[in-house]
Amino acid sequence: MTRFQFNIHARDGKARTGTIQMQRGEIRTPAFMPVGTAATVKAMKPETVRSIGADIILGNTYHLMLRPGAERVARLGGLHKFMNWDRPILTDSGGYQVMSLSDLRKITEEGVTFASHIDGSRHNLTPERSMEIQRLLGSDIVMAFDECPRADQPKEVIERSMLMSMRWAKRSREGFDSGEEHAARSALFGIQQGGLNEDLRSISAGKLQEIGFDGYAIGGLAVGEGQEAMFATLDFAPTQLPDGKPRYLMGVGKPDDLVGAVERGVDMFDCVLPSRSGRNGQAFTWSGPLNIRNAKHAEDTGPIDADCTCSVCATYSRAYLHHLQKAGEILGAMLMTEHNLAFYQQLMAGMRAAIAEGRFADFAARFRARYFAR
Ligand SMILES: [Zn+2]
């Protein structure tokens, strides 16, 4: 059985569309991965996540190691069985979330010591332990352990951090390979760092390719630098990475971020935005985002988006969703999340079709004209 095979079926400019074959299923690219932080895509049954077109979801090492614990998930048969999702799962390394969520961090060459944001208990995370946790979870795509410094740091700090992340990438590779049985059926991605600097990104890309990975993530973006700076970095970062391997832009983004990044050669994405903002009443549509809590929707009998093919838009009115959100009803969060994630999958499917048919520039221009027309 194929462990990991990426085939590019069509190209249009820098954009590519293809498939990743893995033992637990096929991933169509460009792909958007819904985020299942704590062994759940919040407010969504796994069967619904699948029915709207997601081929792969993301799980968070940091959250799962703290609760319920990686060893417990392993004793219960692994993350797939535990949460009832039999398709591929990508797990992050925990590095980014340790930096952003935990208290009392201490970062050394060895790894990170931190206090849990849940109960203050002390934990260590090293490249080796991160690989072990992702193995215990039964991850299909394992991410190398890295440090993600804030984008506003001086270049020397970004460089020092990037070089340490590259040493951690090598230790991640060795740790992953030592788990032979798991390594034989899963994949390991490296993570390019270097902030907004072309020279540092190039050094990072070179070091990662010396080590060798199944895919390459672009890390350290979408951390507050803004879309213009992110796109400027994506003008060079993806093409510094191997052409024949998947490129994954971590933590991105808004629908217009996804279109601009695919245009620049990115194949995979994850972001909490569609699920988190759905719970807060924001819906994404082909005509831009809207806030369902706004009074103008109170007696609107139309769907969130007349051109959305999701079951929420086929069934429920803006007026009803407005009421559910205002009343704080759980169903409101469920339906808004389902629409948003379905909309993201429709956007990815639209991009894949446009690339395959050689009309991506036209698709992107039409998308922007309508999305920003207000
Ligand atoms: Zn919809």
Image (cartoon, helix red, strand yellow):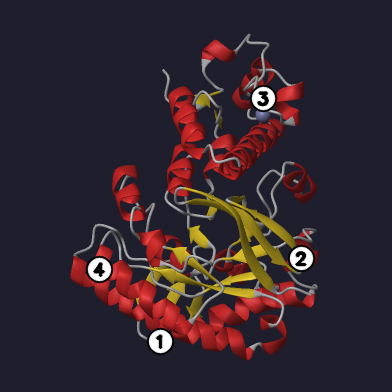
Give the residue pinned by disc 4. 199
Local packing at callout 4 (Cα closer than 10 Å; few below 14, some 14-19, many 20+) is: few
Q: Is 228 or 130 nearer to us in this picture? A: 228
- Position of residue 236 measured from the top left corner of the image (x, y, whole percent): 33, 58
What residue did someone put label 1 on?
Answer: 110
Mark 1 vs mark 3, CA separation in Å: 49 Å
Q: Are marks 4 and 2 in contact (CB under 8 Å)?
A: no
User: Tag 2's secondary structure?
Assistant: loop
Residue 342 to residue 46: above or below:
above
Q: Which residue lies furthest to the top in this view?
A: 299
Q: Do the residues labelled 4 and 1 touch (CB within 8 Å)?
A: no
Judging from the image, what secondary structure is the residue with disc 3 in? helix
Which element carries disc 4, helix, strand or loop?
Answer: helix
Q: What residue is pinned by disc 3? A: 324
Residue 295 in the figure: left or right of residue 369:
right
Q: Is residue 142 above or below residue 263?
A: below
355 to the left or right of 301: left
* Label 4 vs 2, first from the N-terminus: 2
Q: Distance between the residues labelled 3 and 2?
A: 37 Å
